[in-house]
Each structure stands twice: as C-alpha cells, then as structure tokens.
Image: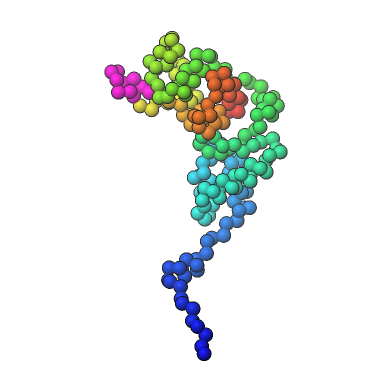
Amino acid sequence: MSEPVEPSLPNETAHALAVAEPDIDLALLRRVIEAALLTAEEPLALAELKRLSEVPLENRQIEECLQQIAESYADSGVELTRVASGWRFRARPELQGYLDRLNPQKPPRYSRAVMETLAIIAYRQPVTRGDIEEIRGVAVSSQILKTLEGRAWIEVIGTRDTPGKPELFATTQQLLDDLNLRSLNELPALEEMGSLIDQSGQDRD
C-alpha cells in the first residue's frame, strides 16, 4: 500500500513560506542609531531613524532600540530624551551647572512681558495681537513679538476672518524642543516656564 500523498500548499502560501524575512542585525542597528543621535544637531524623528536601516523596519523595532540605548546611558552624564520633533541626547540637568563653567556667558534673560506674551500664545493659541493685549490689559510692543519670532518660538499661522485680517500667532515645535517637551499638554505654569526658558538658553548657547 503506497504512502498517502500530502496535499500541496497553494502557490501563494508556498511562496510566502519560501520568502524569509530579512535578518536584522539589532546590535549594529543600535550602534548606528546611537551614533546618529550623538552626532545630530537636531532631534531625529522615527521616520529619519528608520532610514538608517538597510531593510524596512516597524516603529516598534526602532522604539525598542531607543529604549535599550536609553537604558545603557542610565548611569552616565547624558540621557536620551524624547521631544516634540524626535529623539536626542542631552546633558543631565543636574550637571548643567558644571558645564556652564566652560561657557560662563549668561544666556539672555527675558522680561516678564515677553514671558507673559509667550504663555498667552502657548495656552490660548491661535491668538491675535489684540487677544494678547486684551488678556494682559496693556499694549504688546512689536519688539516683544519680534523677540519671540527671532527665537523661533512663535510663528504666524494665518489670519482671523475679521475686519483687518489680524495675524494669528501660535507656538512652534522649536519651543517644545527647547523646553524638552513632547507636546503642548506638558507645558508648565508661567513661573516654571521661566526656569525652563533659562535652562534652554544654557543648553543652546
């Protein structure tokens, strides 16, 4: 009696089994991602990090590598952080005072009027200049807005459909990156924002 013949697999299934997923050298990938982050001048988004691989990757795989890299720096003087536009390394905040000795020049300090204007735009955006003046109860000088635009913390995103077409101001991703925040939901109170602004000036200058 002959042996029973097993039914053949459908062509699609056989092809799928024959084509193996490309091997991913995760150790090498972690080293490449680490090198990219350490040498990048700006935060790197997941889409940019995925381009470092020779084979297609899922976000989950990149995020696992990032988590492992972050853990490997747990006891070092730098840390891997996530901000609005991606991932980057930075010196640990508790060490910043020592690093400031290399550059004793103090970053610019902003007036309360500038900080209040920034906070209003951040929490109420989009807002017009008139909105800001109504909330603050005083006129907003053009220099205040120029200062914030010059730091790339605010931008004009359009105009309001009212007489005069006043410009609408909103904050930028650069502000969130400078404050080491992921989203507007993490914005602190005005007093805390001031200390974060001071720290961001030390980080960038």
Q: Position of residue 81 (x, y in %)?
A: 59, 36
Which image quadrant is residue 106 in? top right
Q: Determine the residue positioned at 47% across, 70% down.
A: 14
- Residue 2 in the image: state x and y as whole percent: 51, 88
Is 78 on the left or on the right of 117, as rendered? right
Q: Position of residue 27 (x, y in %)?
A: 63, 53
Q: Nearer the viewer, residue 61 or 34?
A: 61
Q: Dominant secondary structure of the magenta stretch?
A: loop
Most foreground residue, 196 or 144: 196
Residue drawn at the location 61% of the way across and 40% of the way down:
38
Task: In the displayed orientation, state which residue is furthest to the bottom.
Answer: 1
Question: Which segment did they paint magenta?
Answer: 159-168
Q: Is residue 161 magenta?
A: yes
Quadrant into which the C terminus falls: top right
- The residue that appears at 29% across and 18% down in the rendered structure is 164
Q: Is residue 205 something one can see in this rendering?
A: no
Give x and y (percent) for residue 133: 41, 13
Which residue appears farthest toward the left when viewing the image?
A: 163
Q: Is residue 120 above or below residue 173?
A: above
Residue occupying the far front of the picture: 1
- When the figure is inspected, residue 18 is found, relative to residue 160, above or below; the finding is below
